């Protein structure tokens, strides 16, 4: 299966993951297969606001007569479409790559903010992602900020942390062709654990997906975790 389409434009590539892969493992239940136009987003906000008003009605909330709540359904719908789930409705980011002539060490970026939402409870997942990969000489490296863009794309939707970790890993693994390894670690706190159910504050969840030299070499794996700690 063709997983991505690459168009060359000097050093910038537009890489579009196969739409079939884009939503695998995520919050499924909203059947969106593609990018929405601004008009479609507005239409979605209008529809979602009406339903959220009904949701509040069902909870016995007299939101229509409360000045602080009367616009809340619209606000909530806008927040989902424009921010909280924006990764679901926008295209995969443009990825800039550069030729690599001599570097064969770890490229690491740490403390990338994770702002996401759990699919199970629609409560926030807040934390950090740590990403590393090892390029092949005479192949490509990714513009550093594009790692942040990839994280944003996948985090900004309903997700579970396990799948989020894998999707970020797999995207980098596909984009950096012939890489010698990719490592992604996420540590995040889940509001659904802290504010409901068991109500345990201060807990965090750690997940990792390592491949290539990060699995095969203890030295490389240790170096990655040293970078995470430092
Ligand atoms: Zn949850």
Image (cartoon, rainbow, N blue to C red):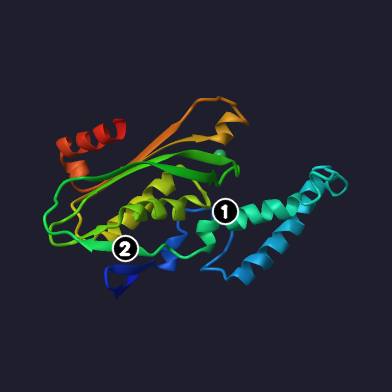
Q: CA distance from mark 2 to mark 1?
A: 24 Å
Q: Residue at x 31, y 63 (%)?
A: 96
Tag 1 residue: 83
Residue shown at the point (83%, 43%) measured from the top left: 61
| Quarter residue 170 falls in | bottom left
Q: Using a 10 Å C-alpha cutoff, classify the residue at mark 1 as few (fewer than 14 neighbours), some (14 to 19) or many (20 or more).
A: some
135 relative to 111, above or below: below
Label 2: which residue? 96
Residue at 50% across / 57% down in the picture?
87
Camera-side residue: 47 or 3? 47
Would you say 206 lies left or right of 143 here?
right
The spot of residue 168 in percent (x, y) is 37, 51
Task: Please determine whether, in this image, residue 180 is positioned above or below residue 2.
Answer: above
Which quarter is ligand 1 in? top right
Quadrant of the image occupied by residue 198: top right
* Crowding at mark 2 (Cα within 10 Å: few <14, some 14-19, many 20+): some
Q: Secondary structure at mark 2?
A: strand
Element class at badge 1: helix
Place of residue 5 in the rendered image (x, y in percent of width and height, measured from the top left):
34, 72
């Amino acid at each position: 299966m063709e997983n991505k389409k690459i168009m060359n434009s000097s050093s910038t590539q537009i890489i579009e993951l196969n739409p079939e892969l884009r939503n695998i493992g995520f919050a499924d239940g909203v059947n969106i297969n593609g990018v929405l136009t601004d008009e479609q987003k507005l239409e979605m906000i209008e529809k979602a606001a009406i339903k959220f008003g009904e949701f509040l009605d069902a909870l016995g909330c007299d939101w229509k007569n409360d000045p602080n709540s009367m616009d809340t359904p619209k606000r909530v719908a806008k927040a989902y479409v424009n921010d909280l789930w924006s990764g679901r409705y926008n295209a995969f980011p443009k990825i800039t790559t550069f030729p690599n002539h001599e570097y064969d060490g770890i490229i690491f970026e740490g403390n990338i903010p994770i702002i996401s939402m759990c699919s199970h409870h629609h409560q926030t997942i807040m934390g950090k992602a740590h990403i590393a990969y090892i390029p092949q000489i005479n192949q490509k490296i990714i513009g550093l900020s594009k790692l942040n863009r990839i994280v944003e794309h996948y985090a900004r939707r309903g997700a579970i942390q396990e799948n989020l970790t894998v999707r970020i890993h797999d995207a980098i693994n596909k984009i950096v062709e012939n890489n010698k390894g990719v490592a992604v670690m996420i540590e995040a706190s889940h509001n659904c654990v802290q504010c409901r159910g068991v109500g345990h504050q201060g807990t965090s969840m750690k997940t990792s997906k390592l491949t290539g030299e990060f699995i095969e070499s203890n030295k490389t794996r240790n170096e990655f975790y040293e970078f995470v700690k430092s």
